[in-house]
């Protein structure tokens, strides 16, 4: 569970912030907006969770494939090593299989 505290100047801003967070996370509980003891603004609490991962969509995303040329297989995030990789769009951190990275380092004689 993720606990989020939102502090804003007014209730409208708190609702807008809660809505924006709700687009990225699954909100399981939302407290009522309460005035702060200091008198400046309101506080709102959210309990949230990460949304479930759609494994099929994750597999289909080309950014989730191994960055080593010739491999191209899906790399689960739990197993992935982020490696700076140059592609047509510039430099990005690509997912690599640990075995592919070790093989590439052996080929290039990099430790």
Image (tube, rainbow, N blue to C red):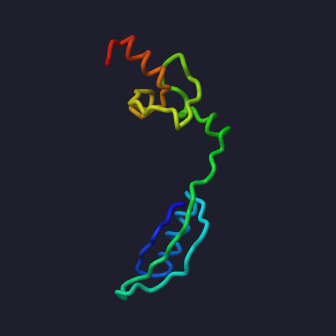
Residue 108 sits above or below residue 75 on the image? above
Residue 78 sits above or below residue 104 on the image? below
Residue 56: x and y in percent read 68, 38
Residue in front for this viewpoint, 35 or 23: 35
* Residue shown at the point (53%, 64%) measured from the top left: 20
Q: Is residue 64 left or right of residue 7?
A: right
* Residue shown at the point (52%, 37%) measured from the top left: 78
Residue in front for this viewpoint, 2 or 23: 2
Residue 13: x and y in percent read 47, 75
- Count of numbered circles in the view: 0
Residue 44 sits above or below residue 47 on the image? below
For residue 62, what is the image quadrant?
top right
Residue 31: x and y in percent read 55, 77
Residue 42: x and y in percent read 44, 82
Looking at the rendered image, the quarter that the N terminus falls into is: bottom right
Q: Is residue 48 left or right of residue 4?
A: right
Looking at the rendered image, the quarter that the C terminus falls into is: top left
Q: Is residue 104 left or right of residue 70?
A: left
Can you name the residue that lies furthest to the front here? 1
* Residue shown at the point (48%, 27%) measured from the top left: 96
């Amino acid at each position: 569970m993720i606990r989020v505290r939102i502090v804003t100047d007014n209730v409208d801003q708190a609702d807008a912030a809660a809505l924006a967070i709700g687009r990225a996370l699954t909100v399981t509980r939302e407290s009522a907006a309460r005035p702060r003891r200091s008198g400046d603004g309101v506080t709102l609490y959210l309990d949230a969770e990460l949304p479930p991962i759609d494994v099929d969509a994750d597999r289909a995303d080309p950014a989730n494939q191994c960055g080593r040329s010739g491999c191209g297989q899906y790399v689960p995030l739990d197993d992935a090593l982020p490696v700076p990789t140059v592609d047509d769009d510039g430099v990005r951190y690509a997912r690599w299989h640990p075995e592919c990275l070790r093989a590439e380092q052996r080929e290039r004689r990099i430790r």
